[in-house]
Image (tube, rainbow, N blue to C red):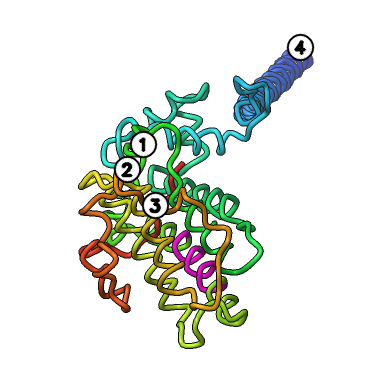
Amino acid sequence: MRETATTDESTETNRTSVATETTRASVTTETTDVTETDTSESTRETDTSESTRETDTSESTRETGTGETTDTRTAFVEATYCALCEYGYANVTMQDIADRTDRSKAALHYHFDGRDDLFREFLSYLHDDFVERTANPTGETPAARLVDLLRTVLSTPDDPDETVEFTTAYLEMKAQAPYKEELREGLRRIDDHLVDQVATLVAEGVEAGEFSAETDPEAVATFVSTYLHGTWTRSVAAGSDVATMRARLVEYVTEELLVAEASLDTIDSSTAASPDTVDSDAAAPPDTVDSDPVRSDAETTRGETDGSSEVSQ
């Protein structure tokens, strides 16, 4: 009997051992399944992330209507110009800008942190465009090159309505410049470039004997910048004729800066304001020209905030 009992106990022990091993194996299998499941989930998340990045990359190199591959950021910046013309700076939204591209608003937010970041980029774009348009003014002498530069800066596009719309939006940005650093810095960069360019040409003119040795290049450059502010502001606020104001500025160079011994054969009839086109509110008669142009033109730019000359597109 004792032998039988011992045998039964041994059998039970074996059964228990087998059950334990089976349980361990089951737990191991479940752990493995969970690990594999987690790995699978991680893989799927990684695949989703990769897919998103690939989509963003594809979005940034999508073909435009002209068939040229354009960087997504540039497409949004260029669309900003169109949206500004239609809605103005105060009212334009990120959606308005995205709607003028074949990209989504989500893609716009992917490339720019927000509205301020986008307009910082937009002003940088305007700066680069302004530098390119005003690079290497033509003319055989410094005075001639200065005149060509002024003509370029105050050139009027073919679409006058678009000019007014954009100039209005640009003035809105200038009005906000005291409160927004990104606007203030962007506008200042454009203005600084113009002032430096004018001052350089005037200094070269003094050295060449075209302008008086007493002429202060920095003072002239500051006056020109101030005059340009007034011109674009009055063209929108008072309806002043830009072409007339441009002719008046060229006249300042040829009659006030240019010494009597010098001549400027490159000036053609298009720069002179004819009696039929002179705006009495925009140009002073010859006998009222003040030898201190900054003081005499101050009324046209009173109230201007620090910014830059308007860049007509």
The answer for how far apart the CA atoms under marks 2 and 3 are is 10 Å
Q: Is residue 130 magenta?
A: no
Residue behind mark 3: 310
The amino acid type found where label 1 is placed reads Leu
Q: Position of residue 53 (x, y in %)?
A: 63, 31
Labels 1, 3: front one: 3
77 left or right of 56? left
Q: Determine the secondary structure under disc 3.
A: loop
Which contiguous range is marked in magenta? 190-200
Q: Three-letter amino acid code at disc 4?
A: Thr
Q: Position of residue 12 (x, y in %)?
A: 70, 16
Query: Which residue is situated farthest in the bottom direction here?
Result: 214
Residue 7, image quadrant: top right
Tag 1–tag 4 contact (CB < 8 Å): no
Residue at screen point 69% across, 17% down: 19
Q: Which residue is mark 2?
A: 169
Measured as percent of width and height from the top left, residue 164 is found at 32, 39
Q: Are marks 2 and 1 in contact (CB under 8 Å)?
A: yes
Residue 239 lies, with reference to residue 280, above or below; the image says above
Of tags 4 and 2, which is closer to the observer?
2
Q: Say above or below: 216 vs 255.
A: below
Whether residue 23 is visible, yes or no, is: no
Left or right for 174, reference 73:
left
Instruction: Answer few, some or many: residues within 10 Å of disc 1's Cα (few below 14, many 20 plus, some between 14 and 19).
Output: many
Residue 303 visible in the picture: yes
Residue 289 x, y percent position in the rendering: 28, 70
Sequence-earlier tag: 2 or 3: 2
Picture residue at 29% right of the left edge, 58% below the top = 230
State the separation of the CA atoms marked 4 and 2.
Answer: 104 Å
Residue marked by disc 4:
4
Give the mark, 4 or 3, whose residue is nearer the N terminus: 4
Residue 37 figure quarter: top right
